[in-house]
Amino acid sequence: MEKSPSRFQDETLTHAIIGAAIEVHTVLGPGLLESAYQDCLCYELTELGIPFDYQPMVSLDYKKMHVERAFRPDLVVANSVIVELKSLEKILPVHESQIQTYLKLTRLTRGLLLNFNTTLLKEGIRRIEPKTGFVPNQKVSQSPQSPESP
């Protein structure tokens, strides 16, 4: 079965993000604050020429009201992948649900949950796709943010 070009591009992008995260984890190791890993991952993505938004504020419309500051994902890479970084002893189902919610509300199709507090980073990687069958009816807009240099 052939992959569609967009799915191939998504997989190529997620592989590049994971590769950059592995580089960060290899150099730093586990046990640091999430913010240290986030800044270093931003550095690696910049070096690779991969565009991203650093903690963009995302708004949404809920029924008859507008929520200006609904949530702030850690990174939105190439306007297509939400990346959430953690430095926890264990990833819980609620962490995966958080990304599911972000995907649902932004209508993006890929999420990565990266837990840097592991011996090997591959143990802390979760690829998240939106659950099928749900199409949100709210309008979601992302406030413009420029990537911050670490």
Image: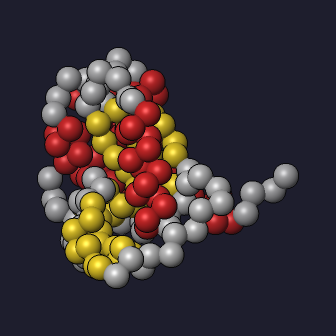
Query: In the image shown, does 128 or 45 lie closer to the viewer?
Result: 128
Is 118 on the left-hand or right-hand side of 145?
right
Tell me the colour scheme of the image.
secondary structure
Question: What residue is at 59 percent from the left and 62 percent from the top?
Answer: 134
Residue 41, relative to residue 31: is it above or below? Answer: below
Is 148 on the left-hand or right-hand side of 20?
left
Rendering coords of residue 52 (x, y %):
33, 63
Rendering coords of residue 114 (x, y %):
38, 38
Q: Quadrant of residue 67?
A: bottom left
**How many numbered discs?**
0
Rendering coords of residue 136 (x, y %):
52, 69
Question: What residue is at 68 percent from the left and 65 percent from the top?
Answer: 5
**Residue occupying the far right of the picture:** 1
Residue 33, relative to residue 43: is it above or below? Answer: above
Confirm whether residue 19 shows in the render: no
**Residue occupying the far front of the picture:** 64
Question: What residue is at 30 percent from the left and 56 percent from the top?
Answer: 73
Query: In the image shown, does 31 or 17 lie closer to the viewer?
Result: 31
Query: In the image shown, does 16 or 136 lie closer to the viewer?
Result: 136
**Residue occupying the far top of the picture:** 119
Confirm whether residue 34 shows in the render: yes
Question: What residue is at 27 percent from the left and 65 percent from the top?
Answer: 70
Residue 5, relative to residue 23: is it above or below? Answer: below
Is 16 on the left-hand or right-hand side of 90?
right
Query: In the image shown, does 96 or 145 lie closer to the viewer?
Result: 96
Residue 27, relative to residue 84: is it above or below? Answer: above
